[in-house]
Image (cartoon, rainbow, N blue to C red):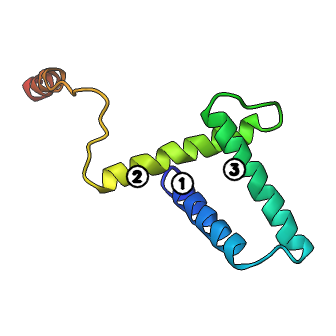
């Protein structure tokens, strides 16, 4: 889910932008989709700046989380290490010594 969800959401966002550029909301379905997209964009932007009102907080938190996951996927694909701390090998070596001496 940490890989599929942000990629799917990015694809949905791209398709929504293309749909709104190429088609006018001439049916109730298109108008409903456009209204939902405006709600999602608004909740995302408000959550990014810490001003989410009640009713938009959950959607904003989810979309900001997916944004962070997508940026991590892109950084990882470009070869950047995403480790947040330096791993220590001394503990692993000590455990390995204990297991081999038994």
1 or 3: tag closer to the N-terminus? 1
Q: What element carries label 2?
A: helix
Is 48 left or right of 30, judged from the image as shown?
left
Judging by the rendered image, the residue that carries numbered circle 3 is 41
Q: Is mark 1 on a helix, strand or loop?
A: helix
Cα separation between marks 2 and 3: 21 Å
Q: Which mark is residue 6?
A: 1
What residue do we see at 9% from left, 29% from top? 100
Vertical position of residue 86 compared to residue 21: above or below: above
Q: Which mark is residue 16?
A: none
Asked whether the residues under the numbered discs 2 and 1 touch, taking CB atoms below 8 Å apart as contact, a structural biologist would say yes
What residue do we see at 7% from left, 24% from top? 101
Number of numbered markers: 3
2 or 1: tag closer to the N-terminus? 1
55 or 96, nearer to the observer: 55
2 or 3: tag closer to the N-terminus? 3
13 or 22, nearer to the observer: 22
Judging by the rendered image, the residue that carries numbered circle 2 is 73
Locate residue 23, reporting x and y percent.
75, 78
What residue do we see at 54% from left, 54% from top? 6
Vertical position of residue 10 compared to residue 29: above or below: above
């Amino acid at each position: 889910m940490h890989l599929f969800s942000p990629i799917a959401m990015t694809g949905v966002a791209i398709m929504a932008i293309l749909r709104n550029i190429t088609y006018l909301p001439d049916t109730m379905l298109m108008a409903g989709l456009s209204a939902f997209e405006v709600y999602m964009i608004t909740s995302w932007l408000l959550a990014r700046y810490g001003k989410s009102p009640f009713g938009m907080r959950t959607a904003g938190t989810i979309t900001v989380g997916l944004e962070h996951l997508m940026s991590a996927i892109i950084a990882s694909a470009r070869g950047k290490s995403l480790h947040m701390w330096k791993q220590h090998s001394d503990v692993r070596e000590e455990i390995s010594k204990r297991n081999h001496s038994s």
